[in-house]
Image (cartoon, rainbow, N blue to C red):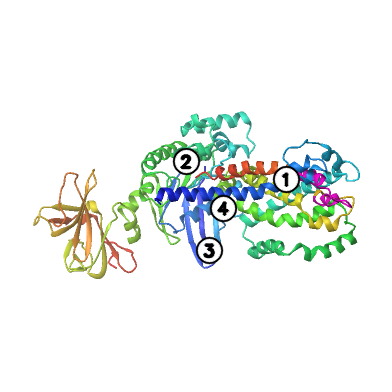
Amino acid sequence: MAEVRLKNITKRWDNFVAVDNQSLDIRDREFLVLLGPSGCGKTTTMRMIAGLEEPTDGEVWIGDNMVNDDLPKDRDVAMVFQNYGLYPHMSVFDNIAYPLKVRGTPKAETDARVKRAAEQVELTAFLDRKPRALSGGQRQRVALARAIVRTPKVFLMDEPLSNLDAKLRVSMRAELKHLSRELKITTIYVTHDQIEAMSLADRVAVMRDGVIQQLGTPDDIYNDPANMFVAGFIGSPAMNLIEGSIKDGQFVTADSTPLVAVGSRDRANVVLGIRADDIEIGDPGKGDLDVEIYSFENMGENTLLTAQLGQQRVIARGERHLRKEQGEVVSIWVNAAHTYLFDNETGIRIRGDDDA
Amino acid sequence: MTGKQKKKLMNAIQVTLILIAIFIMLVPILWIFLAAFKNHIDVFQLKLLFTPTLENFKSVFAPPYYLGRKLVNSTIVALVTVLIAIPAATTAAYAFSRFRMVGETAMLVTVLATQFVPAVVIILPFFVMFRDLGLLDTRLGLIIVNLAIVMPFAIWMIKGFIDGIPIDTEEAAMVDGSSRVQVIRNIVLPMAAPGLLTAGIFCFIISWNEFLFALILTNRDSVTLPIGLALFKAEEGDLWNLLSAAGIIIMVPMFILALIIRNYFVQGMTMGAVR
């Protein structure tokens, strides 16, 4: 049980800066997700906490100890790797028992704890098998069991679900969440999948180019994105980002079509962010704007309608029984309560209340 | 000719060529195998039916040939060479595979480059050096020479096997609480075992068959089997029946080792990483 603190850590390889002077406090028992596109420094950050990578600068603290100079084995962390990192020459039992064995745990206790860990991940029937005789999902469970067989200070998980097929990923995600709430151990989880981040995290740190863009609860980063990158990265389908300007309190698209009242000072070069769910679809003439349908997709549980808006396209979510054809004209209106404004140059959020 | 007939013809040609190749390779071995069980007179006749005798095997171990001593020399030299070479090469290969070092590529190439020097070029300096050091005609001397011959080969081969072990597996072991030494002992060595065995057997074969250095650097006490073969030249001509018997004694261990390698090689390929 411990908090993890990163103080101004930097990781550089020659001229490439993977992590750029970042600080992050992870609370005791918190499930923190590092989220970002590949190459954003999230895995490097985790590997520095594990001790597999040495920070170029800055300090890593686990609990009350500065662990920069500690070997991985002395940091009391457990890690689940993307490729699982199982020991192919050992049985499932020996794989799970390994962290106990190298620490000289008595045999009776080892047996009991391996059995308990195997039960928690439903592997009891496979303890005698070698990893190669297991399916991908089962191997993932072995990796998990090996992590939970001890009670480490911190769990580190590096894209643990990304090698599983889509269906299995969803069920493993739920199991992982259940397990983590049961174990109540500080967990740092790296992923590029925003759905995993939203569903698992207590807090999410969104990273890009070695810099944390926003740190907040899933609610925060979904409903109150700090900048255009976070806004565009979180959510499926991605948030509509429409270029334009503000004139007389109205957002006007680049093609001079007034779209929605935003109640902000007039300025040029603005991006309006609006989620697909916050655009209503109706019969022509009923809404604020009539648009032609670029494509219509039936997703089963709902529908997605992409409309041509001058030079740009916007995507709106319709109810599941909506049926439209490409080329038809519909009317849309934007829910003004859920719009976001960004500076198109810096990407920074323009808040309604600041008169910048 | 239809396509099917054409294919059949091509197949037939292929099989014929393969059979010819096998024939060319196997006939000398078959000849030696037969000659070893023939008496001195039968050797010079190509007949396949003769009264087999074990007399040749008895005489090569008897005076004046004492093949037994040469067998002991060969075995000791090859075994000790392997027992030193494999652990030493494994540590070197692990370092080359896992650590980034200054001048790493240069060192690796240098190790390989030692193999490019023709043995005849350096054999005289070796002779002079060994004479001054008192290593001439000693097993220790031969072991040192053989180590120089097999080490580069063993390092490169074992490095290949260690490269094949996913780094994830080692990192997992480190986070799980192992020191570097424990990682090597508990994870790397067992996973690379088929590779180490294969490399070991190859080194054994190279040492076992080494001729040139043994010829120059030994004369009585530490003569090895390949040099021993040269003893069977007598005034009345080559003693083919004895030569063949000795040849079989040299070859049989090689055949057995080749069979073992074959099994482990397949195992090494299929064990693979678990992804």
Amino acid bearing label 1: Trp
Measuring from the top left, give residue B157's x and y in whole percent: 64, 53
Pointers 2 and 3 in contact (CB under 8 A)?
no
Q: Pick the residue in front: B49 or A39.
A: B49
Res A52 label:
4
The CA distance from mark 1 to mark 4 is: 61 Å
* Comes first in the chain, label 4 or label 3: 3
- Quadrant of the image containing the C terminus of chain A: bottom left
The CA distance from mark 4 to mark 2 is: 21 Å
Pointers 3 and 1 in contact (CB under 8 A)?
no
Disc 3 marks which residue?
A: A12
Amino acid bearing label 4: Leu
Q: Secondary structure at mark 1?
A: helix
Check the residue under mark 1 and report the chain it is in.
B
The CA distance from mark 3 to mark 1 is: 67 Å
* Comes first in the chain, label 4 or label 2: 4
Membership of B228 in magenta stretch? yes
Amino acid bearing label 3: Arg
Check the residue under mark 2 and report the chain it is in.
A
In this rendering, does residue A197 appear at all? Answer: yes
The CA distance from mark 2 to mark 3 is: 31 Å
Measuring from the top left, give residue B163's x and y in whole percent: 59, 53
Pointers 1 and 4 in contact (CB under 8 A)?
no
Measuring from the top left, give residue A175's x and y in whole percent: 41, 37
